[in-house]
Image (spheres, helix red, strand yellow):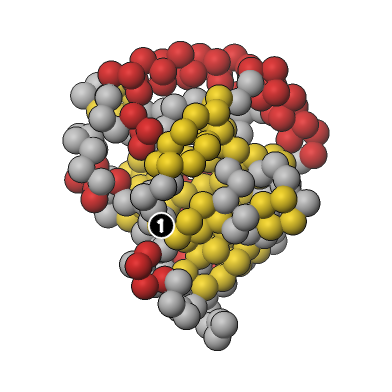
Amino acid sequence: MAELTKWVVEDINRTTPNLAAIHKFSMGDRAGLRFENFLQEYQVDLISHAISKIGIEYYEGDDKAGNIVRKGKLGPNFFRFKSDHGEYFRRARIFEKVFEERILALVNFFPRVQEVASKMFSLGHAVAEHQGRNMMNFTVRMLPEAPIHRDWMPGENTGLSFAPQISEQFAWNIYLKTPKSGGQTRIYKERDPALAGKGNDYFEVAPRVGDLIIFRTTQAHSVMPSDGERLTLSGFFGTTPEKLLFWV
């Protein structure tokens, strides 16, 4: 692989943040950003214990590459229920309360994710709404691997009222458990998933417990096969002319 020196995921340290790297990512010149030790070890333990008490739901779902695979989630994601808006919002109301009382009451990490993104783009933030109903703000995801794909809400014919406002879309992931090996997120320079695997440049970022990783979902990306559990807090946000919108 001929890796471009610019196409990297930059490590961002809390005490001495690399502002130049953050600016270059916001302009599209970096594959992503990794905020090191975004959660401390005791915070990861508190959240992981709470999740184990609630329990992960496993189901058969579309992997965005034409295959049906086993997925593990806690809390709804819209892609799963894109043909049934009512069920998505019904579950969202249930899990908003569950997450607020049993996870965020222990470690209120989500406002910090919003703050990091807001500073990056000098925009305010809000949870996205559809017809007066809030989208889910994050989900818990057990993802052992994922094929090459891209995520682009305005192009998925969802019928969501906020989708046309989105100009760029990003994913954020905080790692709670990492596998013995594998599980890297591979981010391609190419945007078209059909072309990404044909010798194009990419960067692989390895999962590390407590780190926050942010990258553009309009770049083709994949998750390499994992040996062991790969558990994350995950969601999307998109830029609009007025503010950042968060959803999952």
The quadrant the C terminus occupies is top left
Residue at the image point whose x is 71% and y is 30% from the top: 48
Q: Position of residue 70 (x, y in %)?
A: 52, 37
**Does dot 1 land on a helix, a strand or a loop?**
strand
When asked about the image quadrant of residue 28, the answer is: bottom left
Seen at 29% across and 33% down, the residue is 82
Image height of 247 relative to 76, above or below: below
- Name the residue: 49% across, 41% down: 69
Residue 212: horizontal and vertical position, in percent? 61, 49
Percent position of residue 157, x then y: 20, 43
Q: Which residue is mark 1?
A: 149
Residue furthest bottom in the image: 2
On the question of residue 127 being in view, the answer is no
Displayed quadrant of residue 68: top left
Identify the image quadrant of the N terminus: bottom right
Vertical relation: 210 (above or below) 74:
below
Snapshot quadrant of residue 205: bottom right
| Residue in the foreground of this view, choosing between 18 and 196 | 196
Residue 118 visible to the viewer:
yes
Amino acid type, callout 1: His
Q: Is residue 144 left or right of residue 243?
A: right
- Circle 1 packing at 10 Å, graded few (<14), some (14-19), many (20+), is many
Residue 159 image point, x, y percent: 19, 35
Q: How many marks?
A: 1
In the image, is residue 237 above or below residue 88? below
